[in-house]
Amino acid sequence: MPYILRAVKIRSKSSYNDSRMHISNIARSLWHLFFPHTCAGCGNDAISDKQLLCLSCITELPLTNFHLYAENPVQHIFRGRLPVSYATSYTYFSKGSLVQHLLHEFKYKNRKDIGTWLGHRLGEALKASPHFAQPDALVPVPLYRSRERKRGYNQSEVLCSAMANYLNVPVLENIVMRNSPTESQTRKTRIQRWQNIEGKFEARNLSSFGGKHLLLVDDIVTTGATLESCGRALLAAGPVTLSIATVGFATK
């Protein structure tokens, strides 16, 4: 008799667990119906709640693999203009591309989760690089305060926060700032970009960072005018070593 009661209890427990799982699956299905989780790239809803991009979009990302090469096109942008230890970008950026869509959603649609995901990927790539030295700290390219208030966040700070998890280094958010607003760089020539951004950054005294290696981070590099101006302010403020990393490398 005790064996029969034990078998009944086991079957009852199993049925109870099956019922709970069934109810949970129904609840998840209803939640997905009314609040669908979709791919941030293409809108496909056939992904789990833990995924940002579907497999197709992840495969489509145009990775540069510049972190695998000490000499690369981003490094060449700053040659003769700014003394950097290394420079790299995670993906190629072009108009109408998946990367442009993701960065637009990140910067203008409050999709900080996209920035966190991209920052993780960039940090992971740098940590695995056989050529680039580990930085001592990350420095986000600052926004002018009115623009940051309007947007609600600085996209470069979001990237740095995510990268710091992989690189295990601090983020220095307040050592450089924009001292005046600038017009959008989007439709400007290389010379116009430099004229628009020249002298717009100011860094506090970095004497306490003597000999430290700072990694300057931004979302995209096109002509390099913004990063060059910001980098010059950092180098003028103290005896530091400078490197550069961005998510996107704009192609012509």
Image: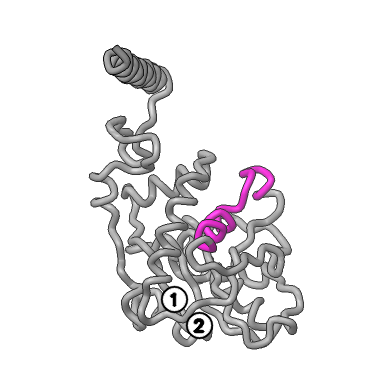
User: Label 2, on which residue?
Assistant: 84
Residue 240 placement: quadrant? bottom right
Q: Which stretch did the figure color magenta?
A: 148-164
In this rendering, the answer to whether 1 lies above or below 196 is above
Answer with left or right where residue 232 lies relative to residue 245. Answer: right
Answer with left or right where residue 92 lies relative to residue 134. Answer: left
User: What is the basis of the colouring in this image?
Assistant: one colour
In this rendering, the answer to whether 79 lies above or below 163 is below
Evaluate if marks 1 and 2 touch, with contact meaning CB atoms under 8 Å apart: yes
Tell me the quadrant of the picture where the C terminus can be found: bottom left
The span from disc 1 to disc 2 (Cα, nearest Å) is 7 Å
The residue positioned 54% from the left and 40% from the top of the image is 110
Q: What percent of the width, then of the height, locates residue 230?
A: 61, 71
The residue positioned 25% from the left and 45% from the top of the image is 55
**Element on which disc 2 rests:** loop
Which dot marks residue 4?
none
Would residue 33 be visible to someone looking at this image? no
Which dot marks residue 87?
1
Residue 101 placement: quadrant? top left
Q: Which of 34 and 196 is in front in this view?
A: 34
Q: Which amino acid does label 2 sit on?
A: Val
The residue positioned 37% from the left and 75% from the top of the image is 129
Q: Nearer the viewer, residue 52 or 94?
A: 52
The residue positioned 63% from the left and 87% from the top of the image is 211
Q: Which amino acid does label 1 sit on?
A: Ala
SS majority, magenta:
helix
